[in-house]
Amino acid sequence: MKKRVMLFLVVLLTFSMVLSAQGAKESSSPSTDAANPYEGQTLNLSWWGYNMDLLDKNVVKPFEDAYGVKVVSETGNNADRLTKMVARKDNPIIDVAFFAGAWAYKAMQEGVIKPYDPAKLTNLSALMEQARDPLGGNYAVGYTIQHLGLFYRPDKVDKITSWRDLSREDLKGYLSIPGITTTYGPSIIYMLSKAWGGDYEDTEIGWKKIEEIAPNLVTVYNVSSQLNTLIAQEEVYVAPYTSFSWGNIMNSGLEVANVIPEEGLVGSFSVVSVGAGTEKEDLVHLFIDHLLSYDVQMAEAMDMVDSPARTDIVLPPEIGDNLTYGEELISELHFFSEKEMANNQKEWITRWNAIFSN
Amino acid sequence: MNTLYRKRALLLLLGPGGAFLLFFFLSPLVFVLAESFRDGAGGVTLMRYGEVLQNRQFRLVFVRTLKMALIVTPLAVLFGYPAAYLMTKLAPGKKSILMSLVILPLMTSPVARTFAWIVILGKFGIVNHTLQVLHLTQEPVRLMYTEGAIIVGLLQLFMPIMVLTLASALENVQEEVEEAALSLGSSRIGTFFRIILPLSFEGLIMGVTLVFTGCITAYVTPAILGGARVLTLATLMRQEALVLMNWEAATVIAVIMIGTTLILYNGLRLFKPGNMT
C-alpha cells in the first residue's frame, strides 16, 4: 500500500514538473514573439518556378528558417501571372512579384506593384547601378542579370561575328529567333537596327531586316525550351538564346559555340517588386533584402540558377563562363527601355503578325 | 403519383450534373457573351465585333482556322467510318483490343504527341529521311511549322474521338437490318448510304461537332506544329488575352468560335437524311 502511495506521488510529481516546464515554455513565448514578430506569417510569392528545388534550397528555406514564416509560391510565366494579379487587383494576395523585361513595366502600369523603400534594403548599394531601379520610381529591383546571346554550330556554319550575319544566305532554313511576345523579342529589332543602320532607335531598318529574314527562319520560338528542342533535333544551327538556357544548349551533346558580336549583346534584369496590396511590407522588404544578400546571390550563382546582380561576387571560371558574368561580357550588354518596349508592344505585335502569319 | 415519382427521380438524377454545368459552364459562357456586347459605360454595343471583324489579321486567321477544321473533319470521317464499322463487326476480344488501340493516343499527353510529330516531320525526321532515300528530294523539305503539319497533328489528335463516337452509334444498327437490305438486292455501298448512314447519323453529327470544335479551339497542337508562322483563332485569342491584355477582343474571338461551332452543329442537322426528303 505504502509502495503504491509512493508510486502515485512520484507520478504526480513528474506530471506536475512536466506541466510546469510546459508552462514555463509557454510563458517564454511572448519574448520569442517579440524577437521574431513574423513567426507563423505567410509570404505569397509570384514567380516562374524554374529550378524550384534549387530556389527552395538557396532562397526559400533559409528565409523560412530565419524568420519562422511560410513561403507560398504561385508559379507561371510572366503573362499568366500578371493576368492573375490584374484579375485579383481588388483582392490581392501576392506580397512579392517577380517579372522580366517589359512585363514589370506593365505590372507597374496596371497598378499591381508598388514602390519599395530603399531605406529598408541594406543590400541595395551592393548591386550594379542599373539594377537598383531599372523601371524608375523604385518600382523594382533587378536581382539577377541575363543576356541574349548568339550561338552557332561551328561544325555546320561559318563563324558568326555580327547580328548582320543573321541575313546570311547559308543560314537559310537553319535559323530561329525569339518571338515578339517574349522578353527579348523586341530587342532583335533594336539589334538589327544597330547592325544595319548604326542606330538602335531607327527601328524601321530593323523591321525591314526582319521582313527579309522571316522566310529564312525554321520558326520563331516562344519559350527557351522550344529552342532547346530545335537545337537537339538539329533543326537550328544559329539563334539568339537566353543566357539561362545556355546550360541546356551545351548539354545537347552537339558542337555549339557562343559569340559576342561586334554590335554587342542584349542585357536585361529579372526584377522583384512589392505587391501593391501587401500588408506585410516589412517582411516583404526583408525577403527582397535576403534575395539580394551575398550568401543567396553566391549560392544561386554557384548552382548556375541566376547570374549575380551584386558586384562583389567572385566566381570560379567554370561557373562564371556559363553565366552573365565578368567585366568583358557585361561591358558589351545593351539595356533597352522597358517602358518603350511596353508602350510599343501592341503595335509591334500587330506588325510582327502581319509579317509572319500572313 | 407515378408521374410525380418519375419527375422527382429525374430531378435527382439530373440535378448534380445539371448544377455543375450551370455553375461551371453556362454561367461563365453567359458572362463571356454579355461582356462581348458591353461598352465601357455599361451599355450594349456591337462596336467590339466591328473592330475585330474589320481587322485584316483576324479575318485571315479566322479563314485559316476554318479551312483547317473543314479539312480535318471530313478526313476524320473518311478514315473513322471504316475503322468504327470494322470494330462493330469484330468478336468482343478483338474489339476490345482495337478499342484500346484507339483510346491509347487519347491517354497520351497532347504535348508528348505533338513532340513525336517533330521527330516524324522534322528536317531530319522519318518522312524527310524516306523522301531522300527514295531520291524524291535532294534537300530536306519544310514540313514542320506549316498548315500541313497542323492538319496532320489535329487529325491524329481528334480521329480517336470520331472513331469512338461512330462506333458507339454503329453499335445500335442491328445487323439484321443490314442483312435484310443485302438480301433484297442492295449493294454494300447502297446499304451503307441508305441504311447504315441514316441510322448512325446522330453519331456522325456528334463526331463531326466534337472534331470540328476541337479543331477550332485547339491550342497546343497549332502552337507547337505551326509556331508563329501559322496563327489560329486559339493562339490569336491567347495573344490578345494574355500578352496584350485586350480582354475585349479575346472575348469577341471566343464568342465567334462558339458561334461558328453552333452554326455547324445546327446546319448539319438540316442534312439529316430524313430531313432532306
Image: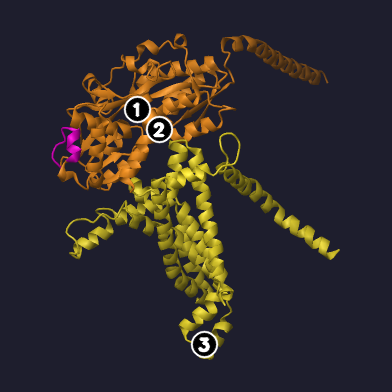
Chain colours: A orange, B yellow
Task: Identify the subunit bearing mark 2.
Answer: A
Q: Which residue is mark 1?
A: A303
Q: Is residue B236 left or right of residue A37?
A: left
Residues packed near mark 3 inside 10 Å, few (<14), some (14 to 19) or many (20 plus): some
Residue A250 in view, yes or no: no
Q: Which residue is mark 2?
A: A51
Q: Which residues are magenta?
A: A156-167
Q: Quadrant of residue A249?
A: top left
Residue extending furthest toward the bottom: B184
For marks 2 and 1 on the same chain, the one whose residue lies earlier in the sequence: 2
Residue B186: x %, y % from top left: 50, 87
Residue A68: x %, y % from top left: 55, 19
Residue B249: x %, y % from top left: 48, 41
Label 1: element kind: loop
* Residue type indicated by callout 1: Asp
Cα separation, mark 2 vs mark 1, equals: 10 Å
- Check if mark 2's residue and mark 1's residue have beta carbons within 8 Å: yes
Q: Nearer the viewer, mark 2 or mark 1?
A: 2
Q: Nearer the viewer, residue B201 or A330?
A: B201
Label 2: element kind: loop
The residue shown at (63%, 46%) is B27
Task: Identify the subunit bearing mark 3.
Answer: B
Q: Which residue is mark 3?
A: B182
The label number, if any, that marks residue A102 in the structure image = none
Cα separation, mark 1 vs mark 3, equals: 74 Å
